[in-house]
Image: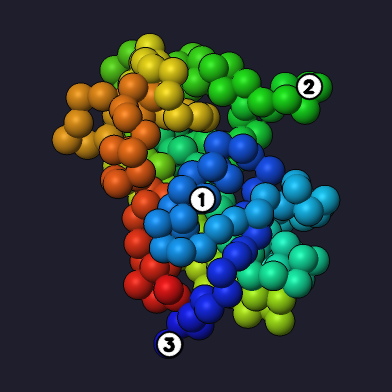
Amino acid sequence: MARRLLEPALVAASFNKGKVAELAELVAAHGRHVIAAADLGLAAPAETGEHFVENAAIKARAAAIASGMPALADDSGFSVAALGGLPGIDTALWAERADGTRDYAMAIAKLARLLADDASRDAWFTCALALAWPDGAVEVFEGRIDGTLTLPARGARGFGYDPAFTPRGYDLTFGEMDQAAKHLISHRADAFQQLLRACF
């Protein structure tokens, strides 16, 4: 039996503004509001896990203990079948520049260079959501959406690899799709629906 979230506010344990915005939108519809970890001056913990669920739990637990509030963390990534699931857990690292900023157009270009012309374009997004409490308890849920790597990338909505991903059964990339429509079908929505059923 999963632990229930009774508190009205929780920390969004992410320093990615796009993710914080998505998490805020997801929980707002269920009577909760989020406070960004950056707004509380929290430090980002080292993500030493080997899987999305491990890193999500690390981030959520660290924020919950440091803030004294429940915390919700996301660890997600983009995977391409023809590259053995890369970039996967290193999704953000592929976009990092030498100065520490992230350039996802650069990361998408790297994918294009690595893929042979006749390689499969099967791809997927994975999202692990971890909800943790200050006593160290944590619940983790993993969602996924399958589709195709789309090159050249299309659209200016969303963030990260969204313009390079077309979900199965759709013609628009996540970068072209209305964000409300994306939130209904995304990997994050999948994980969040599992979290809702278990903890809300």
Q: Position of residue 127 (x, y in %)?
A: 46, 51
Q: Which residue is drawn at 55% across and 58% down?
A: 33
According to the picture, the residue beneath numbered tag 2 turns out to be: 98
Which mark, residue 1? Answer: 3
According to the picture, the residue beneath numbered tag 1 turns out to be: 23
Q: Where is residue 78 in the image (x, y as percent from the top left)?
A: 46, 38
Look at the image and tell me whether residue 105 can be seen: yes
Lateral position of residue 7 relative to residue 180, left or right: right
Q: Which residue is drawn at 41% across and 63% down?
A: 30
Name the amino acid type tagged 2: Ala
Lateral position of residue 79 relative to residue 62, left or right: left
Name the amino acid type tagged 1: Leu
Q: Is residue 189 above or below residue 123?
A: below
Label 1: how many Cα within 10 Å (few below 14, some 14–19, many 20+): many
Lateral position of residue 112 relative to residue 101, left or right: left
Disc 2 secondary structure class: loop
Between discs 3 and 1, the one toward the N terminus: 3
Q: Which residue is drawn at 78% across and 21% down?
A: 98
Name the amino acid type tagged 3: Met
Q: Which residue is drawn at 73% across and 25% down?
A: 101
Disc 3 secondary structure class: loop
Q: Where is residue 90 in the image (x, y as percent from the top left)?
A: 60, 40
